Image (tube, rainbow, N blue to C red):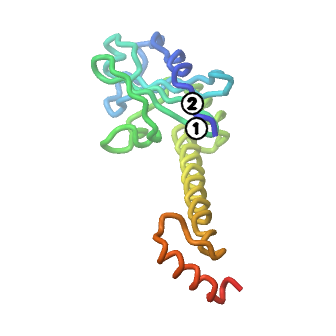
């Protein structure tokens, strides 16, 4: 798994979208964010870029996205633009970008083709774009956790190998080393 190149990703934030303010999506109060998507090649990797614009700010002419999600097949990262032009990189999945409620419930794609780009990138066409993206991110997260768990297990096995072979483990006193070696040599498991 390669990490995302944040410097290169920052270049692909869409700061000048073209919105038709007469679109019905600007009239729905339930929608808090409008999503626009595109697939770009960033640092040699095929990356899905989704910009989330605050609906109220976009209607008033502010064109800066609040969140920009950069999604690869094996990794994802989000750039959050806060107040006073602060930028924070976040590793949270799409569903948990905001503290209150599920983020995707307050979002809608600007065009249907934006949603089709997402489902095609994720390879899951029977769901909505946000469901497909959440499924892909859940798979990535479970792979990350499995990799971390395997690394911990390997580290533990490596430390315990010296005990099983009769050698005292590191970081023990001399007397306890002798006791461990005696018990290990008498153990029926090691014969």
* Above/below status of 162 relative to 41: below
In terms of depth relative to the viewer, which is nearer, 19 or 191? 191
Tag 2 near tag 1, CB within 8 Å: yes
In terms of depth relative to the viewer, which is nearer, 110 or 179? 179
- In the picture, measured across the screen, residue 67 lies left or right of residue 181, that is left
> What is the x, y in percent for residue 86?
33, 21
Nearer mark to the viewer, of 2 and 1: 2
> What is the x, y in percent for residue 56?
31, 21
In terms of depth relative to the viewer, which is nearer, 72 or 33? 72
Disc ID at residue 8: none
**What residue is at 58 percent from the left and 69 percent from the top?**
160
Q: Secondary structure at mark 1?
A: loop
The residue at which mark 2 appears reads as: 4
- In the picture, measured across the screen, residue 32 lies left or right of residue 78, that is left
The residue at which mark 1 appears reads as: 75
Corner quadrant of residue 181 = bottom right
């Amino acid at each position: 798994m390669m990490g995302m190149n944040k410097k290169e990703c920052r270049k692909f934030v869409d700061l000048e979208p073209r919105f038709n303010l007469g679109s019905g999506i600007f009239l729905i109060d339930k929608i808090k964010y409008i999503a626009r998507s595109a697939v770009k090649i960033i640092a040699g990797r095929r990356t899905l870029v989704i910009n989330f614009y605050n609906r109220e700010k976009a209607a008033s002419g502010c064109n800066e996205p609040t969140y920009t999600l950069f999604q690869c097949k094996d990794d994802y990262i989000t750039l959050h633009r806060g107040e006073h032009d602060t930028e924070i990189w976040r590793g949270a999945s799409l569903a948990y970008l905001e503290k209150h409620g599920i983020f995707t419930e307050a979002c809608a794609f600007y065009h249907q083709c934006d949603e089709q780009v997402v489902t095609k990138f994720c390879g899951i066409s029977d769901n909505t774009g946000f469901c497909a993206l959440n499924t892909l991110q859940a798979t990535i997260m479970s792979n990350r956790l499995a990799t971390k768990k395997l690394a911990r297990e390997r580290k533990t096995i490596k430390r315990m190998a010296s005990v099983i072979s009769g050698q005292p483990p590191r970081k023990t006193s001399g007397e306890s080393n002798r006791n461990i070696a005696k018990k290990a040599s008498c153990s029926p498991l090691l014969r």
